[in-house]
Amino acid sequence: MREEILPQINSPEDIKKLDLPSLELLAQEIRQRIISTVENNGGHLGANLGVVELTLALHSIVSAPRDKIIWDVGHQCYTHKLITGRQDRFHTLRQWEGLSGFPLPAESEYDHFGVGHSSTSISAAAGMVIARDLLGEDYRVVAVIGDGALTGGMAFEGLNHIGSLGKDILVILNDNEMSITNNVGALSDYLGRIRSDTRLYQAREGLAAFLRGIPLVGPPLARLAHKV
């Protein structure tokens, strides 16, 4: 697949200039680049393929690197790296003296927290918003956490903390049902019941049917509705 859009993306600001068809093509090109790189170098495939659109959407509404995004699990950051000025080095991913497979502050001003695996983002974000407000600064902090990472004890601690702070912080739950092994615990069971709820299924199908009737933009919006 010949890349048309991705080579033109030097920063997240370039994404904000794209229309919907161009964004869809960009997502395809990013997936192909990730697949080919992981085939050669190894790495984490599933988590990254599932977060492409989320990453593009998030970078379309925040002002990075001023606004801070924390990835949890850390290794779902490949799309983030591709669109933040590192695509020319992406072939060195997980290689000696190449790009890290995780967010790395020493590597880029867009990486705000050196995270490895999981459950750390919410507590880190809490610390950042406290520091922000103490210094009288004005930027947004976003924690992107998966349903598997959300079952970790540190994530519970972070949720409990930010719930008492009353501060401006955004937590995005990427409920993608992806983890190394089956998730356990009450929260995992609760999320599973939500996903399988008949009322949610009917509402989602009804919304998708309505959206498919809208010319041009309807079909892609309907596909997104199935992920709600």
Image (tube, rainbow, N blue to C red):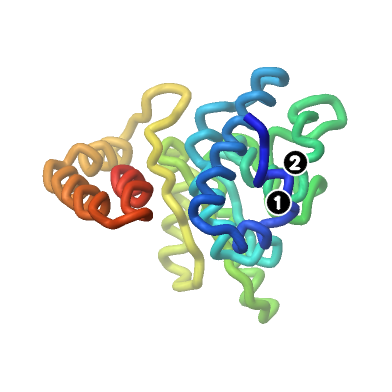
- Please say whether residue 5 is visible from this viewpoint: yes
Q: How many marks?
A: 2
Decide which of 82, 197 is in the foreground and name it. 82
- Please say whether residue 228 is visible from this viewpoint: no
Is the Cβ of the residue at disc 1 closer than 8 Å to that at disc 2?
yes
Q: Earlier in the sequence, mark 1 or mark 2?
A: 1
Amino acid type for the residue under numbered disc 1? Ile
Query: Around disc 1, counting alpha carbons within 10 Å, would you say few (fewer than 14), some (14 to 19), or many (20 or more)?
Result: some
Query: Around disc 2, counting alpha carbons within 10 Å, would you say few (fewer than 14), some (14 to 19), or many (20 or more)?
Result: many
Locate the N terminus and report the quarter of the image it occupies: top right
Question: Where is residue 191, by image quadrant?
Answer: top left
Give the Cα separation between the discs numbered 1 and 2.
Answer: 9 Å
Instruction: Give the side of residue 78 with respect to residue 162, left or right.
Output: right
Residue designated by label 1: 9
Secondary structure at numbered mark 2: helix
Decide which of 183, 9 is in the foreground and name it. 9
Image x and y of residue 81, in percent: 69, 44
> Which is in the foreground here, disc 1 or disc 2?
1
Residue designated by label 2: 87
Image x and y of residue 73, in percent: 55, 39
**Picture layout, residue 166 above or below residue 123:** below
Instruction: Kindly give the residue lying farthest to the front in the view shown.
Output: 215
**Picture layout, residue 73 above or below residue 85:** above
Amino acid type for the residue under numbered disc 2? Gln
Decide which of 226, 116 is in the foreground and name it. 226
Identify the residue at horizontal 61%, vertical 38% (top origin).
30
Identify the residue at horizontal 43%, vertical 43% (top origin).
150
